[in-house]
Image (tube, coloured by chain):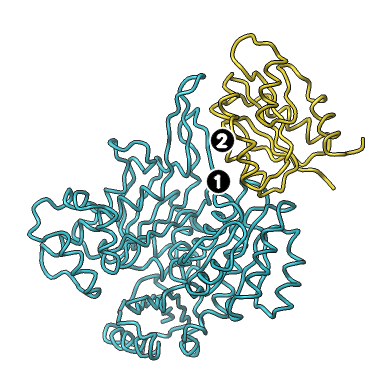
Chain colours: A yellow, B cyan
Amino acid sequence: MQKTVVLGVIGADCHAVGNKILERALSEAGFNVVNIGVMCSQEEFINAAIETNADAILVSSLYGHGEIDCRGLREKCDEAGLKNILLYIGGNLVVGKQDWSDVEKRFKGMGFNRVYPPGTSPEIGIRDLKRDLGIED
Amino acid sequence: MDAALLIDFGSTYTKLTAVDLENEEILATAKDLTTVQTDIMIGFKNAFEKLKEKINLNKVNFVEKLACSSAAGGLKMVAIGLVPELTAEAAKRAALGAGARILGVYSFELTKFEIEEIIDKKPDIILLAGGTDGGNKDCIIHNAKLIAKYIIKNVPIVVAGNKNAQDEISDIFNKYNIYYKITENVMPKLNQINVEPARKVIREIFMEKIVEAKGMKRAEKFINGILMPTPAAVLKAAKILADGTDKEEGIGELIVVDIGGATTDVHSIASGEPSKAGVTLKGLPEPYAKRTVEGDLGMRVSAVSLLETAGIKRISKFIPNSKYDIEERCKFLQSNISFVPKNEEDLEFDESLGMVATEIAMERHVGTIECLYTPLGTIYSQVGKDLLNVKYLIGTGGVIVHSKNPKKILSTGKFDPAAPNYLKPVNPEILVDKEYILSAMGLLAEKYPDKALRIIKKYIVKV
């Protein structure tokens, strides 16, 4: 059974290139990718996940405001009936040079299952996704 | 001479249009009150008598008799989807495009309370959607089960949801002996809208079932068939005028504003892509042929709700020196639905209502643009259709057809620099359906598209 993932860039962020690269990499890895594109609100991620019965929501954020944009996403997922859906995030999540372990801790505290620093290759995310969804390679 | 008789069984009037098929001319039009309560043919015969006075029937051979109808409340529908902004919205648009009146839009898993509400509304057809293909199917199956269990058995259901739920839904409906038809998903992929197959099935059911249920079967003995709801005929005429046919060129992107007694309809035949660079499109893509219906904006039945929506100021802006008290006048018009303006002042008041109806209906139909200030600079995001560069704005409906100054009424549908976020047409040429033939031509276009198109071009006039 092919797994479905919702992919998009959150907030007022319009960085489209990484989004396209991720779409390509995930599709080639066998996922059914529902790409909602750039400048997406939390509600758009959630609505897309409901209609498509998605297994994971993959959020990108590159403009430094990820922390503000993502607050409450996990709670809204719970509210919308998306109990325990996988939430991943990656990109330039915060402003300035901050200690990564600290950033990761903060985003995990917000309910994200996996948090990736800038420059992570798509393969790493895909490997984790397969593991978390119990897909055999 | 070979001619076509085109009939519109309207909510108030039964309108006849006789067309000379050889010379492609309108021979005559006539109307009389619709009599759907007793026998639909009485009103038809009365109108036909009037038509006979205008043309010599010995010389005319009606080779086609086609009808559309919005009598007995029109085609009343309920649309059901999963997420309000997604499949429920797509279902609503499919129903609107089929010419329906929407009684309600429901989303997520229905409750027993909602089912009772739906039954009370007495829909003619229910459109059931939910889930993209391969997506969520629990919701639509839950809703199918509830519908099967509680809905009155003679309401036809159109199923246009997740493909993977079709088999299970068929089993449920077969078990309960429900009349249903399954068609393609209104949203096969996320944010991809696919309304035509559902529209087609709705029309089939309209012809097979609804015409009879509304007591109009008798009319079918005399005419070749009641082919579609009236709004669908107007949309068809608009589409053919814009796009043309195989042999005949169309005039390009256009908007039709149809101001009626109860509702104001707006049809746009245009892609609606952003006309400026650097604009991001948000939300569900819009259908190329889009229809919206404003149930609160009308000249008679909805005169009071128009006042409530617009407010006194917005109406008096267009009619500053009227002798009428606006509130009183709207109440009067609502309780006298067959009132016809008798003097200059009556006409002016009607025109001002028409102007407000056009302004608000267009605001709701067109897309909007929003300016966002982000760390990356100013970003423009567009929701809905950009109609700034649409070339033609066409008016139809009693108030426009009978007005001496239809251009004034329709001008409120143009872009307003004071409200620049509404993407209304900036400089459209304004045309008027002077002979009130658009719905008739939509019907004629079913069999004679080239002729219908040439007649529309001849009779839709520049003002």
Q: Residue at x 44, y 73 (%)?
A: B74
Q: Residue furthest right?
A: A137
Same subunit: marks 2 and 1: no
Q: Pick the residue in front: B175 or B264.
A: B175
Does residue B206 sit above or below A63 in this rendering? below
Q: Residue at x 68, y 45 (%)?
A: A82
Q: Which residue is tagged 1?
A: B285
- Read off the chain for label 2: A
Does residue B434 sit above or below A135 in this rendering? below
Q: Which residue is tagged 2?
A: A41
Residue B405 in picture, x, y percent from top left: 20, 56
How packed mark 1 is, by other alpha carbons closer than 10 Å (few <14, some 14-19, many 20 or more), is: some
Does residue A79 sit above or below B23 in this rendering? above
Residue B232 can be seen in this image: no
Residue B14 in picture, x, y percent from top left: 35, 79
The image quarter containing residue B303 is bottom left
Q: Residue at x 38, y 91 (%)?
A: B38
Q: Tag 2's secondary structure?
A: loop
Q: Tag 1's secondary structure?
A: loop
Label 1 is placed on what type of residue? Pro
Q: Pick the residue in front: B306 or B402.
A: B306
Residue B114 in picture, x, y percent from top left: 54, 66
Residue B25 in picture, x, y percent from top left: 36, 71
Q: CA distance from mark 2 to mark 1?
A: 17 Å
Name the quarter where the C terminus of chain B is drawn.
bottom left
- Read off the chain for label 1: B
Residue B237 can be seen in this image: yes
Q: Residue at x 52, y 74 (%)?
A: B119
Does residue B103 sit above or below A46 in this rendering? below
